[in-house]
Every structure is written in structure tokens, then in C-alpha cells.
Image (spheres, rainbow, N blue to C red):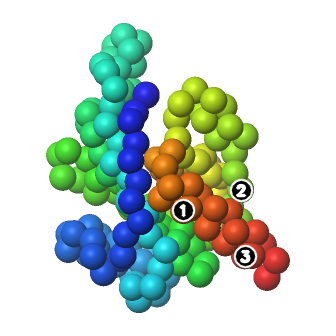
Amino acid sequence: MYDRTSRECSVNGLDPALRSALAGHMELEALGTLRGEEVCCQTLSVRRGRPGLLSRVLKSADPDREHRTTAVLTEHHLIVARSGEGGATTVLSAPLRGMGFDDISQTLSAHGEAGVSLRARWSGRPVAGSYFVALGDDQAGRAFRDALTKAVAKAKQR
């Protein structure tokens, strides 16, 4: 379980290393370039306590006590970057047209986990899979979720 706080942000105002990671991913995946007008949301997730015993034994627990998720919504894609305490940043993207919302999102919300679980064909993956995008249960998190929902619906109409 995490405490999450989201903030609306500008792509141009992101940390230079993060912006570079996003731009590099977009170039690698031929998604165009960042123009600065994209919808952007950054979420800080802080783990509430220690991971459970089973996840510690299996070493499946998140090693970072806190991490930052940056979600960037372009006209045709969602790009998500996750940066942990160790400084490593992982970037994924998926086309909005083939994206769906997993039923687990409502279950997670009922247990105090804010965010959205999305099913899509994520970059670098041969088949569709789910990915949880952390968002705060605050104005910025809800606004981004609403913008994403509308963008996916619009993309499916094209």
C-alpha cells in the first residue's frame, strides 16, 4: 500500500534526465517528439510500511520505498516513466486505440490504492498485458484519469 500524491505538470518543466528518457523512448518507438502541450501528471508514491513477509521471501517486493511515476498523454499514445530511489528510470508506452481499463482498477480503489490498471500492447512486449499506472486520489490524479478515459474513447472512434 502506498500514499500517493499527484500533480499536474508541464513536459517542459520535468527534470532534464527524465525528459531525456521520455524523448529517447519516443524516438526509439517512433512516437514523434515532445511538444510541451501534452497532458502530463507526476505522482509520488511512498510505501506505507514494510512489504509483507511473502513478498520479502520471494523478493517480489518493490525495492524502492518511494518512486515517481510520470504519465504523458499524447494524441495517440500514453507514455509512462517510473523512477525509483536508485535513479533508474523505466519508460513504457502504448497506443490509446488498443488500450482498455482492467476491472482490477475498481478493486484496487476499494482497497485504498489510487491509480488505473491498463491493458494494452506495451512497448517492447510481444503480447498485450496489464500495467498499473499510479495516480493520486486527488484533483490532479482524477483529472489525468478523466483525460485518459476520454482520450482512449476518442482514439477508439477513429
Q: What residue type is labelled 2?
A: Gly
Observer able to see residue 125: no
Observer able to see residue 147: yes
Who is closer to the viewer here, 60 or 113?
Answer: 113
Instruction: Provide the secondary structure element on which disc 3 rests.
Output: helix
Q: Which amino acid does label 3 sit on?
A: Ala
Q: How crowded is mark 2: few (under 14 residues within 10 Å), some or many (20 or more)?
A: some
Residue sitting at 76 percent across and 69 percent down? Answer: 153
Disc 2 target residue: 100
The residue most toward the right is: 157
Residue sitting at 64 percent across and 41 percent down? Answer: 105
Disc 3 target residue: 155
Residue 75: mark:
none
Disc 1 target residue: 144
Q: What residue type is labelled 1?
A: Phe
Residue 51 in the image: above or below residue 5: above
Looking at the picture, how far across and down is residue 72, in whole percent? 46, 69
Q: Is residue 17 found left or right of 102 in the rendered image?
A: left
Task: Report the Cα–Cα distance between label 2 and label 3.
Answer: 11 Å
Q: Is residue 66 found left or right of 142 in the rendered image?
A: left
